Image (cartoon, rainbow, N blue to C red):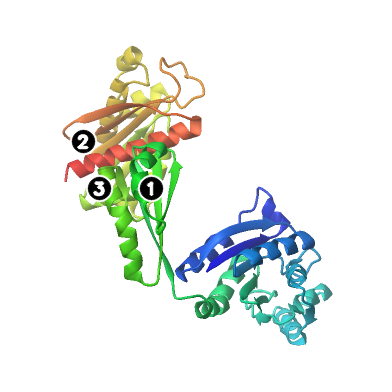
Amino acid sequence: MNAEIIAVGSEMLTPSRVDTNSLYLTAELNTLGVEVVAKAVVGDDRDRLAEMVRQAAARSPIVILTGGLGPTEDDVTREAVALALDRRLVFQPAILSAIEERFRRLGRKMAEINRRQAFLIEGAEALANDRGTAPGQWVEDAGRYLMLLPGPPGELKPMFERFCQPRLARCVPPRLIRTLQLRIAGMGESDVDQLIAPIYRKYSNPVTTILAKAGDIEVHFRAHAETEPEALALLEAVAAPIEALLGDRIYSRDGAPLETVVGRLLRDRRATLAVAESCTGGLLAERITSVPGASDYFAGGFVTYSRRTKIDLLGVSEALLARHGAVSEPVAQAMASGARFRAGANYALAVTGVAGPSTGGESVPPGTVFLAIADHLSCEVVRRQFPGDRGRVRQFAAQTALDLLRRRLLSAS
């Protein structure tokens, strides 16, 4: 069974609001084996919303609407769905009494406009809302299931879990969706696709999707099956040969980001890490410390953006900076060694580069980054030329530094 989700509200079309309800609903529907095939956001226009409901219901047997159930004139979801289904709105005295009682418990007098929330679409079942005044509605129409849910997540989630999930579980065929996510470092999107496409194109189930971020590629597999073992077998059939091709470029099989994977490796080895950052300006340390429990292995960081702080905080030689420039292999090496020594850590990462758009007086082009990793035996430095604007260069640099550490930790095991 397929489903479509429609978020209602003109405020959802502004840059200040994000539709997070659809993410929650998609996850819950997937656990029931329901595939969400479309999502839409529509403003507070009754006729436009009614047409969208007609189209969605013609394509998919499950349609969920969120928002637009309040008491004001711009809350048009009830009217729009009734119009789309060619049904009347019927006043329900019992719902009005429940709304009035809620206001009494809060010590407030109900405004007359709240009466609008006591209208049900003809033939619909009211879904009680113990977190707000707007009841939801469950509507069945010629084998289709429409759900009208309130917009606030604190009201929507308990209503869906209490009323909609059990009903859907009885309505949908016994089927489930399971996913597997591989995360890959050190390769571009086109390179990954060229390598693995001959494998995944053989399969329509699972479906494969490739997503790309700066220095981070995600390969998602989604399998539909009637049982858990069958779904897992489908996933393994396509993922296993792809994993064999990609090898250690795969850093995660459970969707964990690189900073989490590196944190696990450091903790397992009871090792500590320090960082020295110039062009990334603390981004690397922020990613490392975003992981709960990072204090177990993160000794600290130095944001040495200027030449003076490189000298004062890390002990980089003034002569070295004068001879090679701040963005150079020798300076990256000195930064990593200095950070490791001064923090008393087992490992240290250093990043120095030109994020752009200007060169900042350095002799290398924008996008040039030197990355270093130091331990008690050696200090390795790599030079990279990253594409994109300032933000992407910084993201590439942080991701590449973490992958250098991952590879060093794996080789030391």
- Three-letter amino acid code at the position of disc 2: Asp
Q: Mark 3 points at which residue?
A: 244
Within-10-Å neighbours for mark 1: few <14, some 14–19, many 20+: some
- Give the CA separation, mark 2 to mark 3: 30 Å
Q: Earlier in the sequence, mark 1 or mark 2?
A: 1
Within-10-Å neighbours for mark 2: few <14, some 14–19, many 20+: some
Pointers 2 and 3 in contact (CB under 8 A)?
A: no
Q: Where is residue 272 in the image (x, y as percent from the top left)?
A: 25, 44
Q: Name the residue under label 2.
A: 375
Pointers 1 and 2 in contact (CB under 8 A)?
A: no
- Give the CA separation, mark 1 to mark 2: 20 Å
- Three-letter amino acid code at the position of disc 1: Thr
SS at badge 1? helix
SS at badge 3? helix
Q: Where is residue 413 in the image (x, y as percent from the top left)?
A: 16, 46
Task: Looking at the picture, tell me which residue is in the foreground, 238 or 186.
Answer: 238
SS at badge 2? loop
